[in-house]
Image: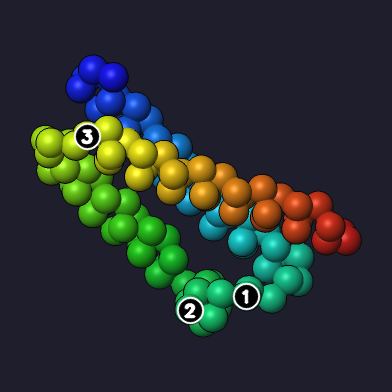
Amino acid sequence: MPLEQTALQTWRWYWALLAANVLDLAFTYAAVGRGVEEANRFLKPILLTPWPIAIKMSAFMLLGAGLLQLSRARQPLRLLHIVRATALFYLGVLLFHLLGLSLIAY
């Protein structure tokens, strides 16, 4: 794969990962709003504060900066595989959330 195309694909997967994380948090809020208890023991005490959003935003800014630096590395295809695998993992998390939300009685 040409270097330019690899970089473009990496950034597309980055944005897909960002969108998946936003939806993950939205689905978490939806489930908690329907009476489901948050299972993540680290997120549970701060869920209803600005911290989850601030942490995710900070993490994605750092990831973006890291991608800019690493995109100049010798193995951009490896970077693409890592970002793609992470995005696909979060897609699985979203499907899990959707399944859980569909099972919750209104």
Instruction: Tell me if label 1 and label 2 are in contact, CB under 8 Å.
Output: no
State the mark number for residue 39: 1
C-alpha span from label 2 to label 3: 33 Å
Q: Could you tell me which secondary element the residue under label 2 belongs to?
A: loop
Mark 2 or mark 3: which comes first in sequence?
Answer: 2
Q: Is residue 55 above or below residue 37?
A: above
Q: Is residue 78 visible?
A: yes
For the residue pair 71 and 61, the one nearer the viewer reads as 71
Query: The disc labelled 2 sits on which kind of residue?
Result: Phe
Q: Name which residue lies at 20% across and 22% down.
A: 3
Q: Name which residue lies at 36% across and 62% down.
A: 54
Q: Position of residue 91 (x, y in %)?
A: 56, 45
Q: Position of residue 8 (x, y in %)?
A: 29, 24
Q: Which residue is mark 3?
A: 76
State the mark number for residue 42: 2
Q: Name which residue lies at 44% across and 66% down.
A: 52
C-alpha span from label 1 to label 3: 36 Å
Q: Position of residue 45 (x, y in %)?
A: 51, 82
Q: Is residue 82 above or below residue 93?
A: above
Q: How many marks?
A: 3
User: Colour scheme used in the picture?
Assistant: rainbow
Q: Could you tell me which secondary element the residue under label 3 belongs to?
A: helix
State the mark number for residue 77: none
Mark 1 or mark 3: which comes first in sequence?
Answer: 1
Query: The disc labelled 3 sits on which kind of residue?
Result: Pro
Query: The disc labelled 1 sits on which kind of residue?
Result: Ala
